[in-house]
Structure formats: C-alpha cells, structure tokens
Image (cartoon, rainbow, N blue to C red):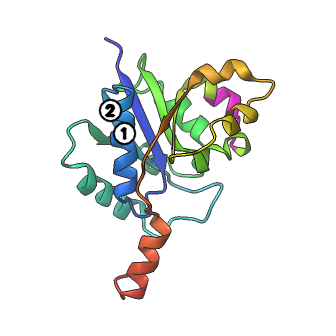
Amino acid sequence: MTLKLGILGGAFDPIHEGHIHIARLAYQKLALDRVYFLPLNQAVHKNQPHYSGEQRAELIRKAIKPYNYMYICLYDLERGGPSYAVDTIRELKNHADFTGQDLYYIIGTDAFEQFFAWKDPYSLLDLVKFIVAARPGYDFARIERMFAGAETYLDRLFLIEDAGLDVSSTRIREQAENAGEL
C-alpha cells in the first residue's frame, strides 16, 4: 500500500504552534497518512540555528506527542553537513520508511517563493510534490508566474489557503531572550 507522507523541513529553532498548524492543515486538506518533521542540520539560505540539533529534536518530540500521525525524522541531523532539500529527499527515498511512498514537501509561500534559489530545484520537483500553504488573500498567480516556461511542474503543486497563525521562531527567541530564558 502506497502511503501519502508529508515532510515538513526546517530549522525548528524553536518549533512553534505555527509549524504544528501547517502540518495539521496539510494532513487534513490532502488526506496525508503521516507528517514527518525534518529538522535541518546546517542552514544554507539563512542563519544557523540558535538551538542545538539535540535541543530542537527534543522540542519537536514534545510538540508532536499529542498527534499520532506526526513523526520526527533525524536524517539531516544524523548525516551532518549542509542541509539541501534535494539531497535529503534523494537519500530518504532509499530509506525503508519512504521507498515507494508518495512524498509531499510542506512549505509556506514565503519560503516557496525562494524555491528557485535552492539547489537543483527541478530535480526536487521530480522527486516530491509540494503542499504550499498561503495566508488568506495570497495571490496564487505569483506562483504561476514563478513557473513561466515550466508550467508542466504546476501539477506537482497543491496550493492551500490557511487562515494561519502569526508566529515566528525569531519572535519566540527574542521574547525568551528578553525574559532571560535563553
């Protein structure tokens, strides 16, 4: 039986309710069987995580505990080095839990709009489908314009509108630092 597996990659520095929310939304809207949180090891397109990999993994475990369809995948942390989505997905597809399954990469529009700056984006589009979550009123035509000349890939995208939660890891870290918790 082929499963529909969602993969939510990121720094999770720290994980917050917005991450859980987008995972739940993708699970519900696309009838996924499971959602895997995939914390990156070494950021490529932004600052390095403040929390260690072990700390971030433990925070993820605690956050997803109430959800029987959410899992953590430590592949990037265990592999080490820079975390490129295309490399990770290529290797995950050879892992027993992922081989032969339908993979869906879950991402917000803000990150997806940077997609063509990622390493080997067209290969990644060949490997997985994308669930792109947008805030209400987002102009999905922006994404269509990104794919001008490569419209055949648009059928690999599932666009979902999200009422959303306005939460960011940066803001959580700043609040914790101001409260003397970090």
Circle 1 sits on which residue? 25
Q: Nearer the viewer, residue 114 or 87?
A: 114
Q: Quadrant of residue 38?
A: top left
- The residue depicted at 44 percent of the width and 61 percent of the height is 166
Circle 2 sits on which residue? 28
Position of 9 with respect to 112 (left or right) is: left
Position of 19 with respect to 45 (left or right) is: left
Q: Quadrant of residue 120?
A: top right
Dot 1, how many residues are within 10 Å of its Cα: few (below 14), some (14-19), or many (20+)? many
Q: Secondary structure at mark 2?
A: helix
User: Residue 160: percent from the left, percent from the top?
Assistant: 48, 35
Residue furthest to the right? 149
User: Residue 6: percent from the left, percent from the top?
Assistant: 41, 33
Give, as a three-letter code, the residue at label 2. Gln
- The residue depicted at 34 percent of the width and 33 percent of the height is 27
Q: Is residue 92 above or below residue 53?
A: above
Give, as a three-letter code, the residue at label 1. Leu
Which label number is shown at residue 145?
A: none
Q: Quadrant of the C terminus?
A: bottom left
Magenta residues (range) = 118-124
Q: Nearer the viewer, residue 140 or 170?
A: 140
User: Residue 147: percent from the left, percent from the top?
Assistant: 74, 30
Find the distance from the CA under tag 1 to the CA under tag 2.
5 Å
Q: Quadrant of the N terminus?
A: top left
- The residue depicted at 51 percent of the width and 65 percent of the height is 49
Q: Are marks 1 and 2 in contact (CB under 8 Å)?
A: yes
Query: Is residue 134 found inside the magenta-colored segment of the image?
Result: no
Circle count: 2
